């Protein structure tokens, strides 16, 4: 995959994570993906979405930063914020559920071979 394809795939993953967080927190996905900071609630939702891209999709902090149009240090801060909040068992269970949902998302690239026949 070339750089353009990688960035397009990363942007799609960021949109997927933002959509899942949007649903879970009732924050419009476009607020999560906005280039501006927005409200504190939208910023928190963005932190969760960036964290999920990092842990569920195993993206480097740099890849997450590019996908969300942020700086790498911003993504690192977001991940630290979410990790710190995971000490709360209820929050940890909630984030684990979102992480599981994203990890179980079918891989990109079409149908599984056995379904294509």
Image: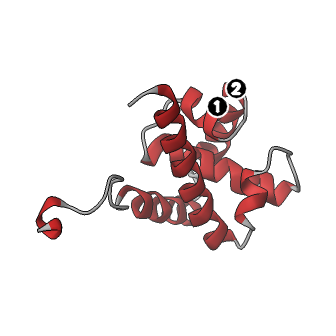
Task: Identify the element where label 1 is drawn.
Answer: helix
Image location (x, y in percent) of residue 35: 81, 44
* Label 2 Cα crowd, 10 Å radius (few <14 / some 14-19 / many 20+): few
Which residue is found at the position 66% from the left and 67% from the top?
22
Where is residue 60 drawn, in percent x and y? 50, 30
Query: Does dot 2 land on a helix, a strand or a loop?
Result: helix
Of 24 and 112, nearer the camera is 112
- Residue at left offset 57%, top offset 51%: 87
Q: Which of 90 and 5 is in front in this view?
A: 5
What is the image's colouring?
secondary structure
Residue 62: assigned label:
none
Residue 107 falls in image quadrant: bottom left
- 51 horizontally vs 46: left or right: left
Query: Could you tell me if the residues under marks 1 and 2 are in contact, i.e. CB atoms within 8 Å?
Result: yes
Q: In which quarter of the image is the C terminus?
A: bottom left
Count of marks overlaid on the render: 2
* Coordinates of residue 17 in the picture (x, y in percent): 56, 56
Indicate which disc residue 76 carries. 1
Residue 72: image location, x then y, percent: 66, 26
Quadrant assignment, res 27: bottom right
- Asked whether 107 or 90 is in front, the reply is 107
Tell me the quadrant of the picture where the N terminus can be found.
Answer: top left
Q: Residue at x 46, y 59 (%)?
A: 96
For disc 2, the marked residue is 73
Name the foreground residue: 16 vs 41. 16
For disc 1, the neighbor class at 10 Å (few under 14, some 14 to 19, many from 20) is some
Tell me what residue is drawn at x 70 percent, y 63 percent: 29
Q: Distance between the residues labelled 1 and 2?
A: 5 Å
């Amino acid at each position: 995959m070339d750089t353009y394809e990688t960035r397009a795939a990363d942007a799609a993953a960021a949109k997927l994570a933002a959509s899942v967080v949007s649903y879970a927190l009732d924050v419009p996905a476009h607020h999560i993906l906005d280039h501006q900071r927005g409200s504190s609630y939208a910023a928190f939702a963005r932190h969760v979405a960036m964290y999920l891209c990092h842990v569920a999709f195993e993206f480097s902090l740099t890849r997450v930063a590019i996908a969300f149009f942020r700086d790498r240090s911003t993504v690192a801060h977001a991940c630290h914020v979410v990790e710190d909040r995971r000490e709360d068992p209820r929050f940890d269970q909630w984030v684990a559920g979102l992480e599981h949902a994203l990890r179980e998302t079918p891989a990109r690239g079409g149908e599984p071979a056995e379904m294509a026949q």
